[in-house]
Image: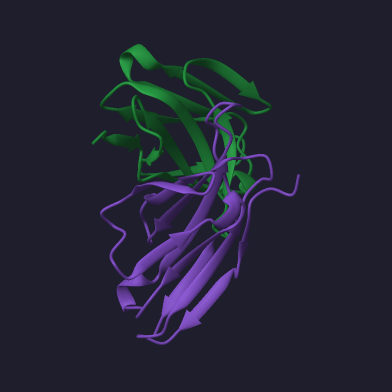
Amino acid sequence: GIQVEQSPPDLILQEGANSTLRCNFSDSVNNLQWFHQNPWGQLINLFYIPSGTKQNGRLSATTVATERYSLLYISSSQTTDSGVYFCAVLPSGYSTLTFGKGTMLLVSP
Amino acid sequence: DTGVSQNPRHKITKRGQNVTFRCDPISEHNRLYWYRQTLGQGPEFLTYFQNEAQLEKSRLLSDRFSAERPKGSFSTLEIQRTEQGDSAMYLCASSSWTGGTEAFFGQGTRLTVV
């Protein structure tokens, strides 16, 4: 099956710093989503981004499907950004998402 | 639109007991998915439904697990004769094929088997 690798696995930032999270995948995909898992375990949708670039406030994402990677940018980080960020892909010809192992982000005041 | 709803949020059970979880998807979504997440890992696919038809089951779904989606609305996931290894977060998601394949997740049910 498809391999989804996220880096870095852990990231510690001071409030106000910027960061880039990366997601590499091993095969062609029809869909890619970024999620933030809150402390209670719920997955919050950040971006639905099979290709191209999207921005939502301090967050933006870029997917280059031909090169099989996606990037999530967090600018001016806040303590509330802390948590685990997951990349999930829908491989071509499949109907279910495959998740990476996530990046654990801690933003300290 | 109230989002995907899961009940209960937490369940503690003794080994060997049966448990059942419920998922109510977003009302206009015809696809419903169950995932399991253990500590430090990403969610892993268990099974999915399109309307009332169960179209795919993962190898993770042992014979002790069964899922239903009667009438294509809510879904239940039952685990029989629970084992300590079943302790995990069980997540439900839904999506609308006609509206694209963006999936939305519920709050999850955290199962602890003691």
What residue lies at 65% left-to-right and 28% top-to-bottom?
A58
What residue lies at 32% left-to-right and 14% top-to-bottom?
A67
Q: Position of residue A53 (x, y in %)?
A: 54, 15
Marks counted in the figure total 0
Q: Nearer the viewer, residue A53 or A12?
A: A53
Rendered position, B12 above or below B105: below
Instruction: Tell me if residue B100 can be seen.
Output: yes
Q: Position of residue B96 (x, y in %)?
A: 58, 34
Q: Quadrant of residue B87?
A: bottom left
Quarter of the image with the C terminus of chain B is bottom left
Instruction: Tell me if residue B43 can be seen.
Output: no
What residue lies at 34% left-to-right and 24% top-to-bottom?
A92
Give the chain coloured purple.
B
Q: Quadrant of residue B80?
A: bottom left
Q: Quadrant of residue A81?
A: top right
Q: Position of residue B25 (x, y in %)?
A: 62, 50
Quarter of the image with the N terminus of chain B is top right
Give the chain coloured green.
A
- Residue projecting furthest to the right: B1
